[in-house]
Image: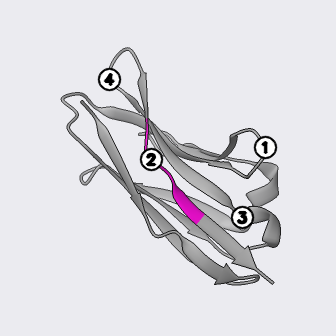
Amino acid sequence: QVQLVESGGGLVQAGGSLRLSCAASGSRFRINAMGWYRQAPGKQRELVATLTFGGTTNYADSVKGRFAISRDNVKNTVYLQMNSLKLEDTAAYYCNADVGPYQYTYWGQGTPVTVSS
């Protein structure tokens, strides 16, 4: 069973930065794409950024130029560097990974990010 454990969330002032980490463990297969999603209160979960094993990135328009996703394929860890944070970035951030030849999807438990004015 694959487990994803996020860390790095917290409270930050608008304009500040945070770095999220997500470590995957327990996989017998290659971890393909990894990514970050977020869900604000009362809203649907939305994509923030994804990164394939080969290095292709995809970002939501709302975070382009402010957030950067990266990964360490040896450690099976994905990171999200969040800069110039805005109030609207407040949400629970979830890590996601597609694993193995059948692309099974796993989710982390989420880490809260609160941006204050």
Dot 4 or dot 2, earlier in sequence? 4
Q: Residues within 10 Å of mark 1 (few under 14, many from 20)?
A: few
Dot 1 or dot 2, earlier in sequence? 1
Q: Nearer the viewer, mark 4 or mark 1?
A: 1
| Distance from Cα at disc 4 to Cα at disc 2 | 21 Å
User: Decide: marks 4, 3 in contact (CB < 8 A)?
Assistant: no
Dot 3 or dot 1, earlier in sequence? 1
| Distance from Cα at disc 3 to Cα at disc 2 | 16 Å
Q: Residues within 10 Å of mark 4 (few under 14, many from 20)?
A: some
Q: Which mark is residue 90?
A: 3
Q: Which mark is residue 100?
A: 4
The picture places residue 12, in percent across and down from the top left corner, at: 64, 81
Q: Quadrant of the C terminus?
A: bottom right
Q: Is residue 56 visible?
A: yes
User: Decide: marks 3, 1 in contact (CB < 8 A)?
Assistant: no
At mark 4, the secondary structure is: loop
Task: Work out which residue is located at the far top of the displayed protein and give it.
Answer: 102
Residue at (61% x, 78% y) in the render: 11
**What is the count of numbered marks?**
4
Dot 3 or dot 2, earlier in sequence? 3
The residue labelled by disc 2 is 109
Q: What segment is highlighted magenta in the picture?
A: 107-112
At mark 3, the secondary structure is: loop
Relative to 99, residue 61 above or below: below
The residue labelled by disc 1 is 43
At mark 1, the secondary structure is: loop
Residue type, mark 1 in image: Lys
Residue at (61% x, 67% y) in the render: 113
Q: Answer with the quarter of the image where residue 114 lies.
A: bottom right
| Distance from Cα at disc 4 to Cα at disc 1 | 30 Å
